[in-house]
Image (cartoon, rainbow, N blue to C red):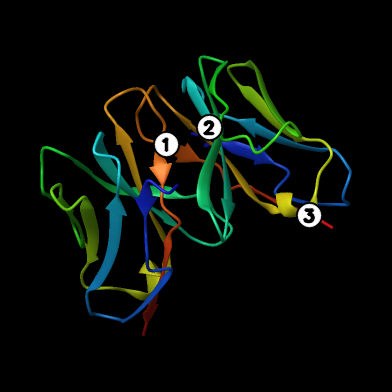
Amino acid sequence: DQQVKQNSPSLSVQEGRISILNCDYTNSMFDYFLWYKKYPAEGPTFLISISSIKDKNEDGRFTVFLNKSAKHLSLHIVPSQPGDSAVYFCAARDSGNTPLVFGKGTRLSVIA
Amino acid sequence: DAGVIQSPRHEVTEMGQEVTLRCKPISGHNSLFWYRQTMMRGLELLIYFNNNVPIDDSGMPEDRFSAKMPNASFSTLKIQPSEPRDSAVYFCASSRNTGELFFGEGSRLTVL
Protein backbone atom coordinates (compact mmCIF):
# COMPACT_ATOMS: atom_id res chain seq x y z
CA ASP A 1 0.00 0.00 0.00
CA GLN A 2 1.56 3.23 -1.17
CA GLN A 3 1.93 5.72 1.69
CA VAL A 4 3.31 8.37 -0.67
CA LYS A 5 1.48 8.81 -3.94
CA GLN A 6 2.46 10.70 -7.05
CA ASN A 7 -0.53 10.21 -9.30
CA SER A 8 0.90 11.86 -12.40
CA PRO A 9 3.56 9.66 -13.99
CA SER A 10 4.54 12.42 -16.39
CA LEU A 11 4.21 16.14 -16.98
CA SER A 12 5.17 18.27 -19.95
CA VAL A 13 5.70 22.03 -19.60
CA GLN A 14 6.94 24.79 -21.88
CA GLU A 15 10.20 26.49 -21.01
CA GLY A 16 9.61 29.59 -18.91
CA ARG A 17 6.27 28.42 -17.55
CA ILE A 18 5.51 27.03 -14.11
CA SER A 19 5.82 23.31 -13.37
CA ILE A 20 3.67 21.95 -10.56
CA LEU A 21 4.33 18.45 -9.28
CA ASN A 22 1.92 16.98 -6.78
CA CYS A 23 2.25 14.44 -4.01
CA ASP A 24 -0.24 12.97 -1.54
CA TYR A 25 0.46 10.95 1.57
CA THR A 26 -1.64 8.78 3.83
CA ASN A 27 0.43 8.44 6.99
CA SER A 28 -0.50 11.22 9.43
CA MET A 29 2.71 10.53 11.37
CA PHE A 30 4.85 11.89 8.54
CA ASP A 31 6.38 15.19 9.60
CA TYR A 32 9.22 15.77 7.16
CA PHE A 33 8.91 15.84 3.39
CA LEU A 34 11.51 15.95 0.67
CA TRP A 35 11.79 16.14 -3.09
CA TYR A 36 14.53 14.32 -4.94
CA LYS A 37 15.47 14.80 -8.58
CA LYS A 38 16.82 12.04 -10.78
CA TYR A 39 18.52 12.28 -14.15
CA PRO A 40 18.93 9.18 -16.36
CA ALA A 41 21.78 6.87 -15.34
CA GLU A 42 22.29 8.80 -12.11
CA GLY A 43 21.09 8.34 -8.55
CA PRO A 44 18.42 10.61 -7.05
CA THR A 45 19.74 13.83 -5.51
CA PHE A 46 18.16 15.94 -2.81
CA LEU A 47 16.35 19.03 -4.06
CA ILE A 48 14.31 20.65 -1.32
CA SER A 49 12.52 19.73 1.90
CA ILE A 50 9.88 20.99 4.27
CA SER A 51 9.06 20.31 7.89
CA SER A 52 5.47 19.90 9.02
CA ILE A 53 5.74 23.06 11.12
CA LYS A 54 5.90 25.08 7.91
CA ASP A 55 3.58 25.36 4.96
CA LYS A 56 6.06 26.74 2.47
CA ASN A 57 9.76 26.54 1.76
CA GLU A 58 11.47 28.35 -1.06
CA ASP A 59 14.88 27.88 -2.63
CA GLY A 60 15.50 29.89 -5.75
CA ARG A 61 13.20 28.69 -8.52
CA PHE A 62 11.90 25.84 -6.36
CA THR A 63 9.12 26.15 -3.81
CA VAL A 64 7.46 23.37 -1.86
CA PHE A 65 4.01 23.85 -0.37
CA LEU A 66 2.56 21.65 2.35
CA ASN A 67 -1.14 21.31 3.17
CA LYS A 68 -1.26 19.10 6.26
CA SER A 69 -5.03 18.96 6.50
CA ALA A 70 -5.24 17.64 2.94
CA LYS A 71 -2.09 15.51 3.34
CA HIS A 72 -0.82 17.07 0.15
CA LEU A 73 2.36 18.72 -0.96
CA SER A 74 3.45 20.24 -4.21
CA LEU A 75 6.67 21.35 -5.84
CA HIS A 76 6.60 24.49 -7.96
CA ILE A 77 9.37 25.26 -10.40
CA VAL A 78 9.29 28.70 -11.92
CA PRO A 79 10.46 29.50 -14.47
CA SER A 80 10.96 25.98 -15.80
CA GLN A 81 14.14 25.30 -17.75
CA PRO A 82 15.07 22.42 -20.08
CA GLY A 83 17.68 21.32 -17.52
CA ASP A 84 14.85 20.65 -15.08
CA SER A 85 13.74 17.71 -17.22
CA ALA A 86 14.13 14.74 -14.88
CA VAL A 87 12.15 12.37 -12.68
CA TYR A 88 11.04 13.94 -9.42
CA PHE A 89 10.43 11.79 -6.36
CA CYS A 90 8.42 12.88 -3.38
CA ALA A 91 9.53 11.34 -0.07
CA ALA A 92 8.41 11.47 3.54
CA ARG A 93 9.32 10.21 6.96
CA ASP A 94 8.07 10.39 10.51
CA SER A 95 9.86 11.77 13.56
CA GLY A 96 11.37 8.43 14.51
CA ASN A 97 14.61 7.09 13.14
CA THR A 98 12.89 5.58 10.11
CA PRO A 99 13.86 5.56 6.44
CA LEU A 100 12.34 7.73 3.78
CA VAL A 101 9.28 6.45 1.96
CA PHE A 102 9.26 7.42 -1.70
CA GLY A 103 6.54 7.89 -4.27
CA LYS A 104 6.72 6.39 -7.75
CA GLY A 105 8.04 9.58 -9.28
CA THR A 106 6.84 12.05 -11.91
CA ARG A 107 8.79 12.52 -15.14
CA LEU A 108 8.97 16.21 -16.00
CA SER A 109 9.77 17.26 -19.55
CA VAL A 110 10.46 20.95 -20.12
CA ILE A 111 10.14 21.79 -23.79
CA ALA A 112 12.21 24.58 -25.26
CA ASP B 1 34.77 13.79 -1.49
CA ALA B 2 33.74 10.44 -2.95
CA GLY B 3 30.06 9.75 -2.99
CA VAL B 4 28.35 6.40 -2.59
CA ILE B 5 30.05 3.93 -4.90
CA GLN B 6 28.17 1.03 -6.42
CA SER B 7 29.34 -1.82 -8.60
CA PRO B 8 28.70 -3.14 -11.11
CA ARG B 9 26.91 -0.34 -12.97
CA HIS B 10 25.33 -2.85 -15.30
CA GLU B 11 24.81 -6.57 -14.95
CA VAL B 12 23.22 -8.91 -17.46
CA THR B 13 22.76 -12.47 -16.32
CA GLU B 14 20.68 -15.52 -17.02
CA MET B 15 17.84 -16.76 -14.89
CA GLY B 16 19.07 -18.94 -12.06
CA GLN B 17 22.47 -17.30 -11.73
CA GLU B 18 23.68 -15.64 -8.56
CA VAL B 19 23.99 -11.86 -8.60
CA THR B 20 26.01 -9.81 -6.13
CA LEU B 21 25.73 -6.03 -6.00
CA ARG B 22 28.23 -4.00 -4.01
CA CYS B 23 28.16 -0.68 -2.22
CA LYS B 24 30.66 1.55 -0.49
CA PRO B 25 28.89 4.24 1.56
CA ILE B 26 30.21 7.71 2.22
CA SER B 27 32.83 7.68 4.94
CA GLY B 28 31.36 8.71 8.28
CA HIS B 29 27.81 7.78 7.37
CA ASN B 30 26.33 5.24 9.77
CA SER B 31 23.13 4.31 7.93
CA LEU B 32 22.99 2.38 4.67
CA PHE B 33 19.95 1.65 2.55
CA TRP B 34 19.24 -0.59 -0.43
CA TYR B 35 16.42 0.60 -2.71
CA ARG B 36 15.04 -0.91 -5.90
CA GLN B 37 13.53 1.18 -8.68
CA THR B 38 10.95 -0.25 -11.07
CA MET B 39 8.35 1.38 -13.28
CA MET B 40 5.52 -0.28 -11.39
CA ARG B 41 6.63 0.37 -7.82
CA GLY B 42 8.96 3.36 -8.05
CA LEU B 43 11.67 3.49 -5.39
CA GLU B 44 11.03 0.82 -2.79
CA LEU B 45 13.15 0.19 0.28
CA LEU B 46 14.54 -3.33 0.48
CA ILE B 47 16.62 -3.20 3.67
CA TYR B 48 18.54 -0.74 5.80
CA PHE B 49 21.41 -0.95 8.23
CA ASN B 50 22.32 1.28 11.14
CA ASN B 51 25.88 0.98 12.43
CA ASN B 52 26.30 -2.17 10.29
CA VAL B 53 23.29 -3.87 11.91
CA PRO B 54 20.26 -4.76 9.76
CA ILE B 55 17.31 -2.86 11.20
CA ASP B 56 14.44 -3.60 8.83
CA ASP B 57 14.47 -6.13 6.00
CA SER B 58 10.71 -6.30 5.56
CA GLY B 59 11.07 -4.89 2.06
CA MET B 60 13.20 -7.79 0.84
CA PRO B 61 10.97 -9.55 -1.70
CA GLU B 62 11.72 -13.12 -0.69
CA ASP B 63 14.35 -15.50 0.59
CA ARG B 64 16.25 -15.29 -2.67
CA PHE B 65 17.42 -11.84 -1.56
CA SER B 66 20.00 -11.32 1.16
CA ALA B 67 22.13 -8.37 2.27
CA LYS B 68 25.17 -8.04 4.45
CA MET B 69 27.22 -5.23 5.90
CA PRO B 70 30.41 -6.76 7.30
CA ASN B 71 31.92 -3.37 8.11
CA ALA B 72 31.17 0.34 7.96
CA SER B 73 32.57 0.73 4.46
CA PHE B 74 31.03 -2.15 2.52
CA SER B 75 27.70 -3.80 1.87
CA THR B 76 26.44 -6.43 -0.54
CA LEU B 77 23.02 -7.33 -1.89
CA LYS B 78 22.82 -10.87 -3.21
CA ILE B 79 20.12 -12.52 -5.31
CA GLN B 80 20.27 -16.29 -5.61
CA PRO B 81 18.79 -17.62 -7.82
CA SER B 82 17.94 -14.61 -9.95
CA GLU B 83 14.69 -14.38 -11.93
CA PRO B 84 13.60 -12.11 -14.82
CA ARG B 85 11.26 -10.20 -12.48
CA ASP B 86 14.29 -9.08 -10.47
CA SER B 87 15.33 -6.87 -13.39
CA ALA B 88 15.47 -3.32 -12.03
CA VAL B 89 17.87 -0.58 -10.97
CA TYR B 90 19.20 -1.18 -7.48
CA PHE B 91 20.33 1.87 -5.52
CA CYS B 92 22.44 2.03 -2.44
CA ALA B 93 22.21 5.16 -0.28
CA SER B 94 23.85 6.32 2.91
CA SER B 95 23.23 8.97 5.52
CA ARG B 96 24.47 10.23 8.83
CA ASN B 97 21.76 9.17 11.26
CA THR B 98 18.45 10.44 9.85
CA GLY B 99 20.03 13.15 7.77
CA GLU B 100 19.98 13.67 4.04
CA LEU B 101 20.16 10.52 1.92
CA PHE B 102 22.96 10.33 -0.62
CA PHE B 103 22.44 7.84 -3.42
CA GLY B 104 24.90 5.96 -5.57
CA GLU B 105 24.50 5.88 -9.33
CA GLY B 106 22.72 2.55 -9.21
CA SER B 107 23.28 -0.95 -10.57
CA ARG B 108 21.08 -1.82 -13.52
CA LEU B 109 20.29 -5.54 -13.41
CA THR B 110 18.86 -7.45 -16.35
CA VAL B 111 17.95 -11.09 -15.83
CA LEU B 112 17.26 -12.93 -19.08
Crowding at dot 3, Cα within 10 Å, few <14 / some 14-19 / many 20+, comes out as some
> Which is more N-terminal, label 1 or label 3?
3
Taking depth in this image into account, of A32 and B81 the one nearest to the observer is B81
* Residue B33 numbered tag: 2
Which of discs 2 and 3 lies nearer the camera? The answer is 3
> In the rendered structure, which amino acid carries the disc numbered 3?
Pro
Residues flagged by tags 1 and 2 on a common chain = yes
Residue at the disc numbered 1: B101
Q: For the residues labelled 1 and 2, say whether their Cβ atoms are less than 8 Å apart.
A: yes
Location of residue B74 in the rendering, given as x and y in whole percent from the top left corner: 64, 24
Taking depth in this image into account, of B1 and B98 the one nearest to the observer is B98
Chain at numbered mark 3: B
Label tally: 3
- Left/right placement of residue B33 relative to residue B88 reads left
Residue at the disc numbered 3: B84
Chain at numbered mark 1: B
Disc 2 is placed on an element classified as strand
What whole-number distance in Å separates the C-alpha atoms at marks 1 and 2? 9 Å
Quarter of the image holding residue B18? top right
Q: For the residues labelled 2 and 3, say whether their Cβ atoms are less than 8 Å apart.
A: no
Location of residue B67 in the rendering, given as x and y in whole percent from the top left corner: 67, 27
Disc 3 is placed on an element classified as helix
Instruction: Say whether residue B26 is visible.
Output: no
